């Protein structure tokens, strides 16, 4: 039985047809010389139909959604390509309509039938949807709505993999650094999710795209924006310490340039930057198979590092683990020596 809240829209087919017609009109009106009054009327209609669709999918305070209606409505939305049309028109829709649209799209992406997610399958068959969601970060009026839906998409491994294999992923390095704080923060959340949620997919991406990725990532670490530097440094530590990223970690800590960068950040005026750098720096020191150029730098700075680390943020009274790690790191630095010296010491020990 159709929901009473639809009033004149008696069936899912009619609901979707009305929404499609209104969205098509809205897109066309913005393509021509816009008539403000006509545009307002169309926008009102779009918002009304979006609200009805939301209620059908998610229910209301007074009425739970009906499974049969959800299935039929979802099928109609896919069949008439409403998801694509809705995302393309998102920038034209009014504020309330944008909110309803993002809620509808997020809800559809969560819907499961058996082992399948029909909307995920739909997006996989229409991957330009993902492109449009990423490009949404270029438009302040829709950036946060696009980001919300994009993250709902990339909760699904197949869609996350699709984004990571698309060249548009690298546009995140631009969006993370935009001047608008809310947009930059949201873009970083999406960026981080892509690199941390689906471990194997992300690890393969980092290994395959190592040079290009870290060329861009180093720019984030050197950014003049404090927030960008701090959150990028913190994420770097997480990525390198994740066992799934062992090959990437091994390659990263084999670079003398990367070590120099971390040593500079370790001495940063910002306590937070220095603290996060500490957690990356310790990976270089703890590595038992250091490259010669890395070992050379550590040995050259050995005494200064021992002195520096002995005093490093010693006022972190409540952080027992940090102090244990710092003491362990100092011990590791003190024990640094060249392989030939290690062999000689071992031979001396055997003869004694």
Image (cartoon, rainbow, N blue to C red):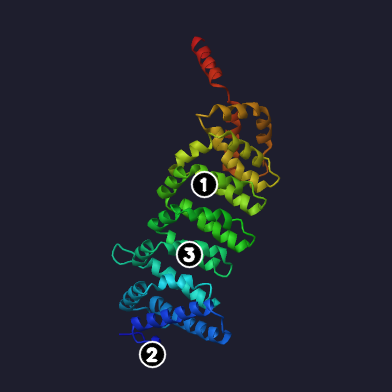
- Compute the Cα span from label 1 to label 3: 29 Å
User: Percent from the top left, x then y, of residue 218?
Assistant: 59, 45
Q: Are marks 1 and 2 in contact (CB under 8 Å)?
A: no
- In the orientation shown, which residue stands out farthest toward the front? 32
Q: Which residue is mark 3?
A: 132
271 displayed left or right of 68: right
The residue under the point 53% across, 55% down is 171
Quarter of the figure with the N terminus = bottom left
Mark 1 Cα within 10 Å, few/some/many (few <14, many 20+)?
some
Tag 2 or tag 1, which sits nearer the N-term?
2
Q: Which SS class for mark 1?
A: helix
Where 60 sits versus 183, above or below? below
The residue under the point 62% across, 59% down is 178
Mark 2 Cα within 10 Å, few/some/many (few <14, many 20+)?
few
The residue under the point 36% across, 75% down is 80
- In the orientation shown, which residue stands out farthest toward the left? 114
Where 20 sits versus 138, above or below? below
- Compute the Cα span from label 3 to label 2: 33 Å
344 displayed left or right of 164: right
Q: Which residue is mark 1?
A: 238
């Amino acid at each position: 039985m159709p929901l009473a809240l639809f009033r004149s829209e008696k069936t899912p087919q009619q609901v979707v047809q009305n929404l499609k017609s209104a969205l098509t009109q809205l897109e066309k009106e913005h393509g021509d010389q816009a008539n403000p009054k006509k545009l307002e009327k169309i926008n009102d209609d779009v918002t009304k139909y979006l609200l009805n669709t939301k209620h059908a999918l998610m229910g209301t305070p007074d009425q739970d959604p009906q499974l049969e209606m959800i299935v039929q409505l979802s099928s109609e939305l896919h069949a008439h390509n409403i998801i694509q049309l809705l995302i393309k028109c998102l920038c034209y829709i009014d504020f309330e309509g944008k909110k309803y649209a993002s809620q509808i799209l997020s809800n559809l992406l969560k819907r499961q039938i058996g082992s399948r997610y029909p909307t995920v399958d739909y997006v996989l068959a229409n991957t330009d949807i993902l492109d449009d969601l990423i490009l949404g970060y270029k438009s302040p009026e829709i950036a946060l709505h696009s980001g919300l839906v994009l993250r709902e998409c990339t909760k699904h491994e197949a869609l996350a993999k699709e984004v990571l294999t698309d060249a548009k992923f690298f546009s995140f390095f631009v969006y993370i650094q935009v001047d608008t704080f809310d947009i930059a923060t949201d873009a970083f959340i999406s960026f981080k999710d892509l690199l941390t949620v689906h471990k194997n997919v992300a690890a393969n991406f980092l290994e395959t795209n190592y040079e290009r990725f870290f060329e861009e990532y180093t720019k984030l670490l050197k950014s003049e924006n404090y927030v960008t530097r701090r959150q990028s440094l913190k994420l770097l530590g997480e990525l390198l310490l994740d066992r799934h990223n062992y090959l990437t970690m091994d390659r990263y800590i084999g670079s003398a340039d990367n070590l120099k960068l971390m040593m500079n950040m370790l001495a940063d005026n910002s306590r937070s930057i220095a603290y996060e750098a500490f957690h990356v720096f310790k990976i270089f020191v703890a590595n038992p198979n250091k490259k010669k150029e890395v070992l050379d730098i550590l040995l050259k700075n050995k005494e200064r590092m021992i002195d520096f680390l002995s005093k490093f943020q010693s006022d972190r009274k409540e952080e027992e683990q940090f102090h244990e790690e710092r003491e362990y790191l100092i011990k590791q630095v003190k024990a640094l020596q060249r392989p030939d010296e290690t062999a000689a010491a071992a031979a001396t020990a055997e003869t004694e």
